[in-house]
Image (tube, coloured by chain):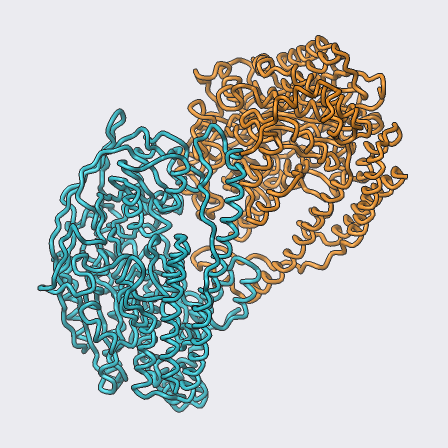
Chain colours: A orange, B cyan
């Protein structure tokens, strides 16, 4: 059995003279500084109250409080006052941003069978806030206005591969309305791809296979989506740019220059509506045409047909479009030592409805950290760097508050921001971290020093155990049994780190717990306090644990003698991405060659059932050998530079210029022109996928060119990424001198 | 595009002097003999009428005709008369076999929620025979009588792995009633494993995920199982022995010595009942307890719980037990040349209900062959060996007619039978052959000479195209693109070849078409002529194609100068089985070692949700190195012997002694004592799996010992298999001299 963290050791940390601690080292700290830091962390932990976090969750989620609502403003003001009460400087920074809310919504089957969708989530006696006034109706923000009637086509998850199958089946969605199920990729990809294929409207529903009774008992008996639950959510094409659609690259201040709404390149031209599976079932049951492949079938008790030649639907949507105020709450705890080095910490405060989990859980965690830091200050704690705690508005519609703030303060942030630490909805189970890989060793250290509430081993040991048990092969399990470092994930999008990391190059992390909090409340009226205390984190212990983790990380970055970046970890990570990409390209070459042979041999025509309409896939151009050498060579330079910097860090170097060099290193990975088709995204290592949305694409310029079989662009992007890595290597080499 | 077989070439075959044909060689024939044979095959084909096969299907399936029914006897007599009308000697050989039919059936939920199962397949206007008198009710033949009440537990497919999960979850089925879904393994495994685990009753249902609306439109709109359809079927433990449960190893003649029924080791002690998914849904919906894992969930619109602590059911079943006559129709076409060398061809005639597909399609194909051979005889054809065509009774309850016949005539068959060629229900699509691998090259040759009705390429080319398209990896696809030989499958059980091959060592084949005839009619009242002509093979063209294939194979074996066995193919096949087994053992060793490490490290305890009751898997004894060398050495000997025999065959050797040596070679692979726990099964290379039923286990003694982690038995069985292979090698070496 695993050892638990001995309480006596933690208690002992306060006693600075304990000789055992003199040997304890944490990244970026001298022995003495480490001892002091661990002692402050222990005092920090003592200030954290699970109960108080729970009280804040209840308070912030007491009413619907979406951006632009009176309750939303009240929550922002409440947050500002809490910060102030904890001794922070706090104020609200307001932006004027576009935001759409529904005026009218109609969806009905037309023709022989008729059905009018209810489009309504009912109140439940077991959920106290589910019947409140002020709820936004079920809708997808940024849907176009529209009144369309057309044949309905079921398009599975609505991703490019699905349309390849439809093409082979000879089914077009041009001039038709598609119905796609939630899942596999971010929701906004579905209407975007539908629009690219000529659809005139898009319906999205949660199939019970992915999110409903197939997964487990439904709310309120269990946590999963009941037949009336609907996932609201943005369908802005944020992979082009997030934030206010009218003010790309600049802050949406009152007098900012704005695009005409019809010209905003990240807004859809077709109407989109999310519905419940109860509303979806009659539509799906009405479809005729071929039966869909097994991978397309959900868990409704119908045979899933593709449609396209029978059932027709009428979809009519109208929205209020107008500028609304977004209230970012910005709280600072200024340092005297390095006032112009900022550690930025953030979580959004706006919710689609009550949002007890999303975002209130993470928000309440962040407020608890602020409270504890205020208490520490009373005990004499002074951070070495300035802390900037931010509660963002308008995250749900498209990272509005954070993006506008980063766009407004971009130059200053690139000068001063050491790192950005993000949280959002937080569950229960296993600690999950993702972000800038130079921070990976520090994150591992922090995980090893915090105890898991359920098992009392460290967060690190529990996360490793989970990875071991879940690993796909005996080989992978063996390696994980022996590892001392867990890999952190890479960031795509889906929360407020995106503008910091991918637009401004600020080293970023996103933190949270998950794995034991599955449910279907996301973006519905049932994301409530009642749901949270029954199914998410009943005792708020994992909320407290997140406050520990985010707090320790924030304070270590704030107090380190040498800011805790290790570029050797970044080097290894990028190398692994490149290896993976080269293998994938090789596999793509072999597969293309073999598939072309099979197609040309006529084997598909023989293998396919002649009574089906299925066609052979198209022959594809052969995959050329791509010259990855520039990137391979750049990585050699990065490895040397990272080693040199690490050697200098080991000497205890920690002057301001050196630290500035360390924390501004990640900016070297940006390219001025950004990624192909989306100049706002400037990071050459991490980006949300053009056709995955939240899902990350690493080495995105190169990877997406290869995936989309754009060979010339792939080689150009290899050069671009190699230049960025070389720039980072040169920067680090200069720093190491 | 593929070339179709040129009609002019086929037409030309009749002209024996065509010089191109002198070059055409087929296995076992001299050039001259090959020319003559191909000409007869062409004349044979000309006698085959798809329409006539269809008429027979309609006639034989006109009424329910299960074993022991008056209609069953009438069908046997009709078959006998048809044989006679085609010029064959034909008679009925009768056995007296045990057979159970239902007297009463009750299944109901007891307690707070109540539901009484309907246990009824209703007549459908679209299916003319579905409302007939004389249908056997829905039941599992060989269920025990019983009246039990107990808590209900859902056990997924009811296989040993499923009980391992239940064990980890702390759920016992002891004293309870289980509900398992059809699929993954043969139905009879489910009550057998349930009984092994202490269950007192077993319900089996077809989940719509596996067999119902999830797969496609349901009958009569489409071919898939509607909510009322039920799969009847035997639950005799035929992997111990098939045939009459009271007369293992001997024919069930009128005066045979019989076991007491309660002592028959292949009969269950618990009641078992199959039900529709409409009847299953209220039972599953009533279950409480943990939600089952994703792999256990079906397509009913409920959350699948495991139960075991709530809903209770009452299951009461009583059966008529008594001896019934089984009427095997045996038709012979005696050869003057080698009258005591028999080529045996068979298909059963009994059905669970009307059985248009199962077995009437294959039966009608076989009758068409007999008709064509009769016509050929009028044109002067005389087979070199005696043809024995058999229509078996009582296949459905457990291969009764064929097993009793083989047991009765075993010694004579081992002396005279060159091979056994089986068919059963036949569909549409791709030609599938399985059986004795020494026949693989001949089967490939035959496939290359018959045209696929839908695409006009050869059966071989179409089957290869399907294998190429479906292959799992680019590597496998590449190999298949270049192969000249398709592998035939290995035979487990499920039709009448089992006693021939696995008890008597008669080289056997099972033939049929499939892949484009999916449906849910199997063993239900909807396996009707109406279903067949709409969804199986509407024009009967694939029935005609099967008559070609089975006819060509039968006639080639009958007429070959040197009977067409190639033991090099058998050698390669057994070698591949051994390689696979050695890799599997190696993987088992690595996995056991790693899993034990993980369990001992306590990682499961950390990775599992503490709010679940799930336990870590148990530590298992380490996997020792098994000595496979005896079998490896035996295979070296077999390779040499097979090469030597092939060299002799190439000289055109074909005297009677040599041929007898060839066709009796497979008997060398039998062992007198049979397989562990089931002495009736004597073949060391092929057997139905002890826990898969129909599914084959190759090198079964060794493989099952390894799977069940019986290391000592594994080494013993390596020795047994090695001795059998050595015996075959010595036999072939002697023959080659």
Q: Quadrant of residue B687?
A: bottom left
Coordinates of residue A526 in the picture (x, y in percent): 51, 21
Question: How many discs mark residues in the rendered view?
Answer: 0
Which one is nearer the viewer's eye here, B226 or B642?
Answer: B642
Q: Is residue A403 above or below residue A239?
A: above
- Residue at 58 percent across and 49 percent down: it is A475
Q: Is residue A157 above or below residue B8?
A: above
- Outermost residue to the left: B255
Q: Quadrant of residue A590?
A: bottom right
| Closer-to-camera residue (A310/B224) | B224
Q: Quadrant of residue B489?
A: bottom left
Residue B95 in view (yes/no)? yes
Q: The C terminus of chain B lies in which quarter of the figure?
A: bottom left
Q: Nearer the viewer, residue B255 or B341?
A: B255
Question: Residue B267: x and y, percent?
Answer: 21, 51
Query: Does residue B499 appear to the left or right of A350 in the view shown?
Result: left
- Residue B412 horizontal side relative to residue A672, left or right: left
Point out residue A30 in the picture as x, y percentages from the top left corner. Answer: 80, 28
Q: Nearer the viewer, residue A121 or A59?
A: A59
């Amino acid at each position: 059995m695993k050892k638990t963290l001995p309480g006596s050791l933690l208690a002992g940390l306060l006693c600075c003279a304990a000789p055992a601690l003199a040997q304890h080292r944490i990244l970026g700290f001298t022995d003495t500084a480490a001892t002091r830091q661990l002692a402050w962390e222990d005092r920090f932990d003592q200030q954290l109250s699970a109960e108080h976090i729970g009280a804040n969750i209840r308070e912030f989620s007491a009413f619907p409080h979406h951006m632009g609502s009176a309750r939303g403003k009240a929550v922002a003001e409440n947050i500002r006052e809490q910060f102030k009460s904890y001794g922070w400087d706090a104020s609200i920074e307001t932006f004027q941003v576009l935001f759409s809310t529904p005026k009218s919504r109609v969806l009905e089957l037309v023709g022989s069978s008729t059905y009018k969708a209810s489009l309504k989530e009912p109140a439940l006696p077991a959920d106290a806030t589910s019947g409140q006034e002020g709820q936004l109706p079920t809708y997808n923000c940024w849907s176009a206005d529209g009144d369309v009637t057309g044949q309905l086509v079921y398009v599975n998850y609505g991703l490019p591969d699905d349309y390849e199958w439809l093409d082979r089946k000879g089914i077009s969605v041009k001039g038709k309305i598609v119905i796609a199920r939630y899942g596999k990729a971010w929701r906004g990809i579905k209407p975007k791809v539908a629009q690219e294929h000529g659809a005139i409207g898009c319906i999205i529903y949660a199939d019970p296979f992915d999110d409903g009774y197939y997964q487990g008992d439904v709310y309120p008996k269990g946590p999963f989506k009941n037949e009336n639950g609907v996932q609201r959510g943005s369908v802005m094409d944020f992979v082009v740019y997030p934030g206010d659609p009218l003010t790309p690259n600049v802050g949406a201040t009152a007098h900012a220059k704005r695009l005409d709404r019809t010209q905003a390149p990240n807004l859809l031209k077709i109407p989109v509506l999310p519905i419940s599976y109860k509303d979806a079932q009659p539509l799906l049951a009405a479809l005729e045409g071929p039966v869909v492949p097994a991978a397309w079938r959900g868990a409704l008790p119908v045979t899933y047909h593709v449609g396209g030649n029978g059932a027709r639907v009428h979809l009519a949507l109208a929205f209020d479009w107008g500028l609304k105020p977004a209230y970012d709450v910005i709280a600072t705890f200024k340092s005297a030592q390095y006032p112009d080095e900022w550690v930025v910490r953030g979580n959004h405060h706006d919710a689609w409805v009550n949002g007890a989990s999303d975002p209130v859980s993470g928000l309440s965690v962040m407020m608890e950290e602020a409270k504890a830091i205020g208490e520490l200050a009373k005990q004499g704690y002074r951070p070495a760097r300035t802390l900037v705690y931010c509660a963002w508005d308008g995250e749900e519609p498209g990272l509005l508050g954070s993006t506008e703030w980063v766009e407004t303060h971009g130059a200053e942030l690139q000068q001063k921001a050491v790192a950005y630490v993000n949280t959002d909805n937080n569950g229960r189970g296993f600690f999950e971290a993702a972000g800038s890989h130079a921070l990976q060793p520090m994150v591992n250290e922090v995980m090893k020093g915090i105890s898991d509430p359920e098992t009392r081993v460290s967060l690190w040991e529990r996360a490793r155990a989970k990875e071991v048990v879940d690993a796909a092969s005996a080989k992978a399990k063996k390696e994980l049994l022996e590892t001392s470092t867990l890999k952190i994930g890479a960031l795509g999008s889906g929360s407020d780190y995106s503008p910091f990391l991918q637009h401004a190059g600020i080293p970023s992390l996103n933190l949270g717990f998950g794995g034991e909090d599955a449910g279907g409340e996301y973006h519905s009226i049932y994301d409530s306090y009642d749901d949270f205390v029954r199914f998410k984190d009943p005792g708020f212990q994992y909320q407290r644990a997140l406050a520990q983790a985010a707090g320790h990380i924030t304070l270590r970055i704030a107090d380190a003698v040498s800011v805790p970046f290790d570029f050797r970890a970044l080097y290894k990570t990028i190398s692994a991405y490149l290896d993976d990409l080269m293998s994938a390209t090789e596999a793509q070459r072999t597969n293309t060659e073999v598939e072309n042979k099979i197609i040309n041999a006529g084997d598909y025509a023989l293998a396919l059932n002649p009574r089906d309409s299925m066609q052979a896939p198209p022959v594809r151009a052969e995959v050329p050998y791509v010259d990855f050498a520039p990137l391979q060579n750049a990585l050699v330079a990065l490895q040397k530079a990272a080693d040199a910097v690490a050697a200098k860090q080991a000497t205890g170097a920690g002057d301001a210029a050196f630290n500035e060099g360390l924390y501004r290193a990640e900016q070297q990975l940006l390219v001025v022109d950004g990624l192909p088709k989306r100049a706002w995204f400037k990071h050459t290592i991490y980006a949300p996928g053009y056709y995955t949305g939240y899902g990350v694409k690493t080495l995105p310029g190169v990877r997406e060119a290869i995936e989309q079989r754009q060979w010339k662009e792939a080689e150009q992007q290899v050069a671009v990424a190699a230049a960025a890595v070389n720039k980072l290597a040169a920067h680090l080499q200069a720093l190491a001198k």
